[in-house]
Amino acid sequence: MAPASTLRNALATPDGKRSYVRRLFATIADRYDLITVLLSYGQDRRWKRRLLNLSGVTARTRVLDVACGTGDLAFAAARRGADVTGLDVTHRMVQLATARRVQTGLDVRFVVGDMAALPFRDQEFDVVTTGYGIRNVPEIAPAIREISRVLRPGGVLLSLDFNRPDNRLLRAVYLAYLTAVGSALGFVLHRDPDTYRYIPESIRRYPGARVVRELIEANGFAMTRHLPVLGGLMAIHTARK
């Protein structure tokens, strides 16, 4: 992938970030599940269970999982009896999720689509979930507005993502760790140490959990909160329309 300066230039504009992220996730799709396990020291599934426990998802709840990847949150919601649709902008991710659907026997629909232009009717869903989605969109506010549009009144948004720590020293150590570990994984898995440099670079540009909460409030939601995960290095956002 790109060296640091090229990556920074690519992420400097919404169009540049959109193109870069789409190329990156097409490249890493087949290794995506492994990477999330390794970078979270196996905690990723536990964090996602916590998110779903906060969602109130039950039988017949209409759930949309955006930036669904290979379907972890979508399948977990389906196991609770929900009517689930998963959406991802990366075609290969949707292929992998669809293959998992066949293996699990769970009735989850998967579609290719953009978080900033959701192909669904107004007020179609009760709950929208996303794991590592909001940080990766070219612009956060338009994506949140789209999520608000497809949620019914009283519907719930839940998001799990990396956080950008406010403390400068902690942030520097965190980003250095992600850079070092990501470089090693990039070399081992792709023979390119720059493959996962995007993760710490995206966190540098991410406004952080508190500001994202403010953006959620400003774009159609109330009763918002963000819950620290892993000592604040990660966060879960919850909000009600």
Image (tube, rainbow, N blue to C red):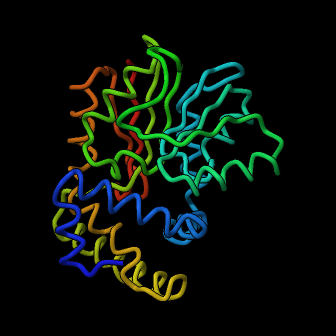
Image position of 191 (left or right of 59): left
Give the residue drawn at x 28%, y 31%.
216
Q: Position of residue 223 (x, y in %)?
A: 34, 22
Rendered image quadrant of residue 150: top left
Q: Which quadrant: the N terminus?
A: bottom left
Which of the pair 17/50 is nearer the observer? 17
Give the residue drawn at x 61%, y 53%.
70
Q: How many marks?
A: 0
Give the residue drawn at x 40%, y 85%.
193
Image position of 99 (left or right of 110): right
Above or below 34: residue 206? above
Above or below 168: residue 87? above
Give the residue drawn at x 42%, y 10%.
153
Rendered image quadrant of residue 7: bottom left
Which of the pair 90/216 is nearer the observer? 90
Q: Position of residue 4 (x, y in %)?
A: 23, 78
Q: Position of residue 239 (x, y in %)?
A: 38, 27
Which residue is the extreme one toward the top?
A: 153
Q: Which quadrant: the C terminus?
A: top left
Which of the pair 170/77 is nearer the observer? 77
Image position of 73 (left or right of 205): right
